[in-house]
Image (tube, rainbow, N blue to C red):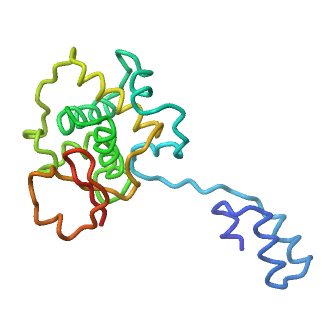
């Protein structure tokens, strides 16, 4: 029981466990006198988990417009926006959001690198990436503004286009062999999305 307390078990949980197992109140008093120490677990840096989904207060176009002309992005946000820009420029806003969500889902899945830049730059995953580098972006165009807004919306889970277990997609004009091994979830615009 001391081991349970030393990894963060609460005294109330211990009391319930002891009483449920039929221990006496004297035994329970001895256990409650033990100091409680929270466990510290060292883990590698992981992309921050997105907030829980919220009901969309505005339609997606209004959310994009609400981001203004220049949403502020950190390095990870820029990588996410870059994937949206090159992978889904010209698609509907829902299609762009779906692409962003696949990148985020991969980073949170444990099957891919744990941050958005590493997911996007992973070898042979995104065709626009060449030797780990991104092509130049026309930063003054409307498509880049939308991509940045979609990155902010996806990162903050302000709207959703796909379930969290969707990790793959491809354009509808190609038929990769791996697509036959996965479950098709949805087609949005020119992309088909899959889960395992």
Which residue of the protein is positioned furthest toward the bottom in this rendering? 22
Which is more toward the observer, 130 or 53? 53
Question: In which image quadrant can residue 9 be found?
Answer: bottom right
Q: In screen coordinates, is 68 left or right of 147? A: right
Q: In screen coordinates, is 83 left or right of 13? A: left
**Place of residue 29 in the rendered image (x, y in percent of width and height, measured from the top left):** 89, 70
Residue located at (36% from left, 57% from top): 109
**Place of residue 7 in the rendered image (x, y in percent of width and height, measured from the top left):** 63, 62
Which is more toward the observer, 118 or 194? 194
Residue located at (26% from left, 34% from top): 79
Which is more toward the observer, 69 or 137? 69
Residue located at (15% from left, 45% from top): 126
**Place of residue 163 in the rendered image (x, y in percent of width and height, measured from the top left):** 40, 54
Residue located at (68% from left, 56% from top): 37
**Place of residue 59 in the rendered image (x, y in percent of width and height, measured from the top left):** 45, 33
Q: Is residue 14 above or below residue 120?
A: below
Image quadrant holding the C terminus, namely bottom left
Image quadrant holding the N terminus, namely bottom right
Which is more toward the observer, 29 or 124? 124
Q: Is residue 4 above or below residue 83?
A: below
Q: In screen coordinates, is 51 left or right of 13? A: left
């Amino acid at each position: 029981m001391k081991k349970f307390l030393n990894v963060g078990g609460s005294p109330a949980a211990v009391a319930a466990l002891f009483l449920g197992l039929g221990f006496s109140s004297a035994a329970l008093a001895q256990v409650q006198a033990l100091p409680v120490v929270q466990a510290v677990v060292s883990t590698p840096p992981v992309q921050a988990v997105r907030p829980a989904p919220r009901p969309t207060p505005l339609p997606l176009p209004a959310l994009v417009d609400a981001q203004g002309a220049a949403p502020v992005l950190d390095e990870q946000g820029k990588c996410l926006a870059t994937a949206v820009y090159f992978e889904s420029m010209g698609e509907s806003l829902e299609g762009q959001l779906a692409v962003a969500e696949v990148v985020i889902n991969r980073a949170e899945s444990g099957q891919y690198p744990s941050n958005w830049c590493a997911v996007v730059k992973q070898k042979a995953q995104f065709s626009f990436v060449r030797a780990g580098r991104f092509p130049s972006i026309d930063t003054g165009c409307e498509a880049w503004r939308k991509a940045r807004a979609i990155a902010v919306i996806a990162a903050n889970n302000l709207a959703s286009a796909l379930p969290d277990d969707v990790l793959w997609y491809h354009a509808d004009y190609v038929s990769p062999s791996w697509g036959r091994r996965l479950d098709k979830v949805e087609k949005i615009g020119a992309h088909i999305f899959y889960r395992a």
